[in-house]
Every structure is written in structure tokens, then in C-alpha cells.
């Protein structure tokens, strides 16, 4: 006997709610839409109930109106990172010649790219970019290459390692959502992150700012004159992140968006 769709949705919603899913109704609708058949639905619901992030279960995350491929173990793009995208996009638009681009523009880099959500969205918003992305995690690099496809190059390496030397001093925009969770705080993260995302994408060291300090120290050599760095941070860490960048000779300011709960530092090279 076939169960009516509304009843199936209620059953899935109840199971998700019992497992502690805050947005159980919305998630149930996504799972029902993605499942090819009842067996697939049961498998997906079981994974979600066991704690795997919904985005890893269905294989994609919504980001800036796009579906970003997310594979198991890869950091899930958050809505707050759309602020990084918006600031990076604005910097590109400001640097665009009057009358629009006539040649391939950039180069542009997404550091610690994960699934490369920012780079992928920039490719849509600014066709013709010379796009690069880097990450230390091989799983993230594989996922990023699926998202960027032929729109950019993805390099496996620690920050700027592995990039061609020809990019030094030429990057127009660098966007980064580097790890900024203090090591001791990882244990208190939701299990979706703590158990199913790589620690490489989360652990920012004792105070969460180890990677931010390294980015501050290294980015100046790669930015073009007047080039822009946009780095995600938290409200509590913003002043320290900004100060690290100012110390390295960049003009830096804090940008906050309460709607997406996002905080970034926008820094400009001299």
C-alpha cells in the first residue's frame, strides 16, 4: 500500500525531530525531494538521524542561490560566508574597467577553500575570472574541483603553497574562510561539525587565530598593489584579526552583517 506524500513527510519529520533536528520539517521536504525511491529515503533519513549533516547526506549545500557539491567529510558552506562572497565580489566590481571587462580578469584566489563555494559563486557573478583555489585537505580539493570544473584551478597545499610563482604580487582578490575555532572549543561544537567535518577546516589553534596570523604575514607578497583580502572571522576575534593585518601593512576594517550572522575583515594592500 502506497503511503500518501503528506503522511510520508509527517513520518520523516517526526523521526528527524526526535533526533534533535531543529528544522525537521524543512529537512524532511529536502530528503523526500532528493530520494530516488523508498530504500534511498530510508538510507538518507538513517544517516541524518545518526548525525551526518543534511548537506552531506543529500550531496549539496545551498549557497548564494547555487547548489554546491558537498562530499562526506568536507566542510559544509555556511550562510554567513556569503558575506565573504559579497565583499570579494564588490572588490572585483570596483576594480573592473569602465565599460566592463574586455579580457580575462583577476587573478582571484580562495584560500582554505573547502568545497570552493565562494570561488564557484564568483565564477557565476563575474564570468571570465582567472580563478584559483587552495586547500590542505585532499577530500576538499576533490570536492572543489567538482564545483569549479573548468572555471578555475584547485591546488592542494597549505595556504599559498603549490601556487605558481607567477601569481606573486598579482592577486586582485583573496577570499578566505580559514579555520578560526579555538582548539579547546571544538569539543563543544554541534556533532554535525565535530564528527563529520575535517578538523583541518575547524581548528584554528589555541586562540583560533593561528591561520589568520599566517594569512596576514603571507598575503602581502601575493596581493597586487591595491588588491583586497577578505577573511571571515567572529565578532569576538574581529579586532585581533584586523590588528594582525594592520601590523603587516594592510589597511583593514571590520564588516558585520547581522542578517547572515557574518563577520569579515576587508584588508587592502598599499
Image: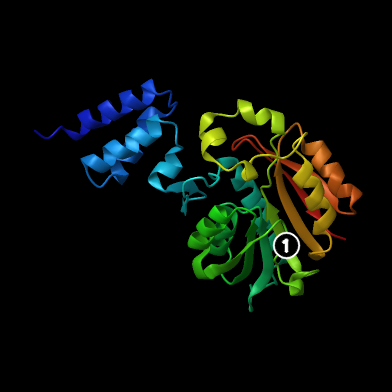
Residue 129: image x %, image y %? 61, 69
Please report the residue visible at 54 percent of the width from the left and 53 percent of the height from the top.
139
Q: Which residue in the rendered view is the most extreme toward the bottom? A: 103
- Residue 1 % position (x, y): 8, 33
Looking at the image, can residue 247 be seen? yes
Residue 235 sits in which quadrant? Answer: top right
Q: Is residue 210 above or below residue 190?
A: below
Considering only vertical position in the picture, is 142 above or below 76? below
The answer to whether residue 228 is left or right of residue 4 is right
Mark 1 Cα shell of 10 Å, populated few (<14), some (14-19), many (≥20): few
Q: Nearer the viewer, residue 178 or 73?
A: 73
Q: Residue at x 81, y 46 (%)?
A: 213
Q: Position of residue 26 (x, y in %)?
A: 38, 33
Name the residue: 67% across, 59% down: 157
Q: Is residue 45 found left or right of 109 in the rendered image?
A: left
In this image, 100 relative to 8: left or right? right
Element type at marker 1? loop
- Look at mark 1 in the image and give the residue it sits on: 161
Q: Nearer the viewer, residue 184 or 230?
A: 184
Amino acid at each position: 500500500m502506497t503511503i500518501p506524500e503528506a503522511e510520508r513527510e509527517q513520518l520523516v519529520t517526526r523521526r528527524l525531530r526526535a533526533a534533535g533536528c531543529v528544522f525537521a520539517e524543512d529537512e524532511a521536504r529536502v530528503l523526500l525531494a532528493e530520494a530516488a525511491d523508498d530504500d534511498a529515503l530510508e538510507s538518507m533519513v538513517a544517516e541524518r538521524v545518526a548525525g551526518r549533516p543534511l548537506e552531506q547526506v543529500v550531496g549539496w549545500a545551498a549557497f548564494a542561490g547555487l547548489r554546491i557539491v558537498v562530499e562526506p567529510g568536507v566542510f559544509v558552506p555556511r550562510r554567513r560566508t556569503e558575506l565573504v562572497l559579497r565583499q570579494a565580489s564588490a572588490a572585483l566590481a570596483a576594480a573592473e574597467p569602465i565599460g566592463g571587462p574586455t579580457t580575462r580578469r583577476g587573478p582571484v584566489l580562495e584560500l582554505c577553500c573547502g568545497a570552493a563555494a565562494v570561488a564557484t559563486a564568483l565564477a557565476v557573478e563575474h564570468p571570465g575570472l582567472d580563478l584559483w583555489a587552495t586547500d590542505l585537505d585532499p577530500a576538499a580539493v576533490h570536492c572543489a574541483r567538482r564545483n569549479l570544473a573548468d572555471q578555475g584551478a584547485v591546488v592542494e597545499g597549505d595556504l599559498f603553497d603549490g601556487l605558481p610563482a607567477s601569481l606573486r604580487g598579482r592577486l586582485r582578490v583573496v577570499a578566505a574562510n580559514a579555520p578560526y575555532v579555538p582548539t579547546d572549543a571544538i569539543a563543544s561544537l554541534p556533532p554535525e561539525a565535530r564528527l563529520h567535518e575535517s578538523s583541518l577546516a575547524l581548528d584554528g589553534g589555541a586562540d583560533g587565530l593561528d591561520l589568520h596570523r599566517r594569512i596576514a604575514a603571507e598575503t602581502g607578497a601575493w596581493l597586487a598593489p591595491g588588491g583586497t583580502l577578505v577573511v571571515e572571522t567572529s565578532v569576538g576575534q574581529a579586532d585581533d584579526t584586523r590588528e594582525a593585518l594592520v601590523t603587516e601593512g594592510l589597511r583593514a576594517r571590520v564588516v558585520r552583517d547581522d542578517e547572515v550572522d557574518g563577520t569579515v575583515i576587508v584588508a587592502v594592500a598599499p
